Image (spheres, rainbow, N blue to C red):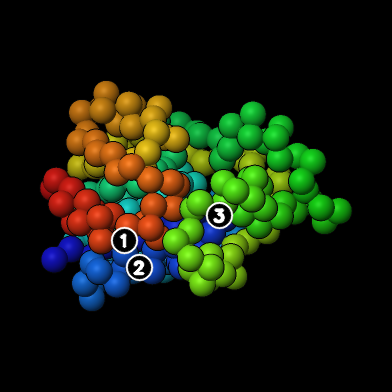
Amino acid sequence: MPCYVLMPSPFLGPAVWAPVAALLGPDVVVPAPRGDTPAEIAASFARQIPERDDLVLVPHSNAGLYAPALAGARDARRLVFTDAILPPGAGRTPVAPEGLRTALQDLAGSDGRLPPWTGWWPPDAVDALFPDAATRAAVEREQARMPFGYLAASVDAPAGWDARPATYLAFGDAYADERADAARRGWPVRTLRGGHLHMLADPAGVAAAIAESPE
């Protein structure tokens, strides 16, 4: 069995992966990324990922930005992007597109920080992401209030990183463009119908999809 590294978004935390981690066996690492800048977050991920020859990186959402460099640094066996940002084969990717930055700029507080991630969206949309109140509370306890400036930063992907074996696992169609991009690269793609935090609603289905991803 490989060692799965379930990478949560820096806006959230390990709780989003906890139900899946419990199903993937004993060899699972769930980092807790911390930092206010891409450099700090990348270093935080790196400190928590072991040096082994059987790593499978499984980034979710914004964590997709950090997977290319980490895959090279740890010589990961493969990657499974899960409803995640998919960087180009080389070059920089903005943390957030301009439209999202514009939509969120008025939410920043006097300290320049954004509210927790679940405060960005309409309440009904957020409610639908969680299977129950206890799960939501566990996730919300770990949310970071990131600086608004983080959204305008960018993260570099080393040239050729996407020659490494990889799969794209989408939850519904919110990341349809990324899924299509992965297909153009010749990667296996799969869609599980659900919301952005589908790993909380159907951990067994998500765990199986990760474990079944091609070598």
Mark 3 — residue? Answer: 127
Name the spot of residue 174 as percent of width and height, x first.
44, 35
Residue 46 is at least partly visible in this image: no
Q: Are marks 1 and 2 in contact (CB under 8 Å)?
A: yes
> Looking at this view, is 201 or 109 the one in front?
201
Please tell me whether residue 110 is drawn above or below residue 93 in the rendered image. Answer: below
At mark 1, the secondary structure is: helix
Please tell me whether residue 106 is drawn above or below residue 212 in the rendered image. Answer: above
Q: Do the residues labelled 1 and 3 touch (CB within 8 Å)?
A: no
Please tell me whether residue 63 is drawn above or below residue 156 in the rendered image. Answer: below
Residue at 60 percent across and 48 percent down: it is 124
> Which label belongs to residue 19?
2
| Quadrant into which the N terminus falls | bottom left
- Residue type at mark 1: give it: Pro
> Which label belongs to residue 203?
1
Name the spot of residue 156 as percent of width and height, x first.
48, 39
- Residue type at mark 2: give it: Pro
